[in-house]
């Protein structure tokens, strides 16, 4: 990775960022399953209804650690690397851990309005939950159309931006 990315580096297309978002979910499935297994073994959990709050807290922290580590270390998670998307601060470098943590917390804006709506509406079941979350995620992604650089709201709020970046190809001498 270069010392810094040029200020005029292009913003990835929204479709590409959403594809990366879906791929990130696939990768996080494994992280969540492993963390859940470790939690279940460590706590002796035999019933999913027992210790559910503790599991949620642990998963929130594990997912946060995943994102904060990769964003602050390389500026890319594994999914972002695949889709050639880089997270940078205003100076064109990967964000500092504190800024990455702020971005992680603000990134929950993707889901919080839809989750609040589900909680208030009393809707139950997989289909209403999926439809509400999908509508919320698409509405949040649509907010990029209001930003001059097409960045997400959480990036605008914490001073980061997503850019298109390809690792230089090493050439044989």
Image (cartoon, rainbow, N blue to C red):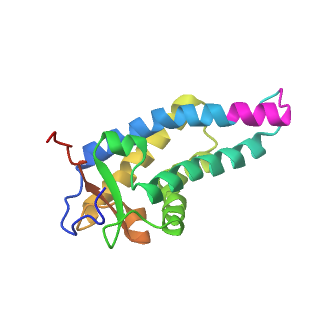
Q: Nearer the viewer, residue 101 or 114?
A: 101
> Is residue 124 at least partly visible in the picture?
no
> Is residue 156 at least partly visible in the picture?
yes
Find residue 91 and report its horizontal and vertical position in percent.
Answer: 32, 73
Q: Nearer the viewer, residue 125 or 94?
A: 94
Specify whether 94 is left or right of 40.
left
The quarter of the image holding the N terminus is: bottom left
- Residue 125, magenta (yes or no): no
- Residue at x 20%, y 43% (from the top left corner): 169
Rendered view: 76 above or below 27:
below
Rendered view: 129 above or below 70:
above
Find residue 55 and report its horizontal and vertical position in percent.
Answer: 73, 42
> What secondary structure is the stretch in magenta mostly built from?
helix
Please tell me in which quadrant of the rendered image residue 105 appears. Answer: bottom right
Q: Farthest residue toward the left?
A: 173
The range drawn in magenta is 36-46
Specify whether 112 is left or right of 53.
left
Find residue 99 and report its horizontal and vertical position in percent.
Answer: 49, 68
Please tell me in which quadrant of the rendered image residue 143 appears. Answer: bottom left
């Amino acid at each position: 990775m270069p010392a810094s990315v040029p200020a005029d580096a292009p913003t990835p297309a929204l479709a590409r960022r959403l594809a990366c978002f879906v791929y990130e979910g696939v990768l996080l499935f494994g992280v969540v399953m492993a963390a859940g297994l470790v939690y279940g073994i460590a706590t002796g959990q035999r019933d999913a209804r027992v210790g559910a709050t503790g599991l949620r807290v642990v998963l929130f922290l594990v997912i946060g650690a995943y994102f904060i580590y990769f964003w602050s270390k390389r500026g890319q998670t594994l999914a972002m690397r695949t889709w050639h998307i880089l997270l940078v601060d205003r100076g064109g470098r990967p964000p500092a851990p504190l800024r990455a943590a702020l971005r992680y917390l603000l990134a929950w804006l993707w889901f919080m309005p839809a989750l609040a709506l589900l909680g208030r509406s009393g809707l139950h079941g997989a289909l209403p939950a999926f439809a509400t979350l999908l509508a919320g995620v698409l509405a949040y992604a649509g907010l990029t159309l209001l930003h001059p650089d097409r960045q997400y709201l959480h990036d605008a709020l914490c001073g980061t931006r997503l850019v298109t970046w390809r690792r230089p190809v090493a050439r044989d001498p």
